[in-house]
Image (cartoon, helix red, strand yellow):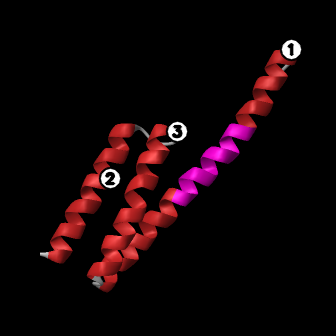
Amino acid sequence: MANTPSAKKAVRKIVARTEVNKARRSRVRTFLRKFDDAVASGDKTAAQAAFRAAEPEMMRAASKGVVHKNTASRKVSRLAKRLKALTA
């Protein structure tokens, strides 16, 4: 258990950051799910719109440290690949 005042404050900060990061991660997953649904339905325009929404959200999560930047880039690349296969 935290004993010093600074350790107690650190615990409070960690709890607050964890909540923010959970919300961001959940938001990213929602956008990815919308893209998956659009691709599964075969709707090209909906998939393009979902990709345009998901890509900046994924990169924002990377810039905030929720996910690693290489992970975000890899996922965006794979989304783009799936979108291209759908449109071709």
Q: Where is residue 9 in the image (x, y as percent from the top left)?
A: 82, 24
Numbered tag placed on residue 13 in the rendering: none
Give left or right: position of 51 versus 5.
Answer: left
In front here: 48 or 68? 48
Q: Is residue 63 above or below residue 86?
A: above
In front here: 22 or 80? 80
Q: Mark 2 points at which residue?
A: 75
Q: Position of residue 66 (x, y in %)?
A: 52, 42
* Quadrant, the N terminus: top right
Q: Which amino acid does label 3 sit on?
A: Lys
Q: Which amino acid does label 1 sit on?
A: Thr
Q: Is residue 66 above or below residue 26?
A: above
| Mark 1, secondary structure of its residue | loop
Tell me the mark number nearer the camera, choosing from 3 and 1: 3
* Residue drawn where x is 69% and y is 46% of the image: 19
Residue segment shown in magenta:
16-27
Q: Mark 3 points at which residue?
A: 64
Q: Name the residue under label 1.
A: 4
| Mark 3, secondary structure of its residue | loop
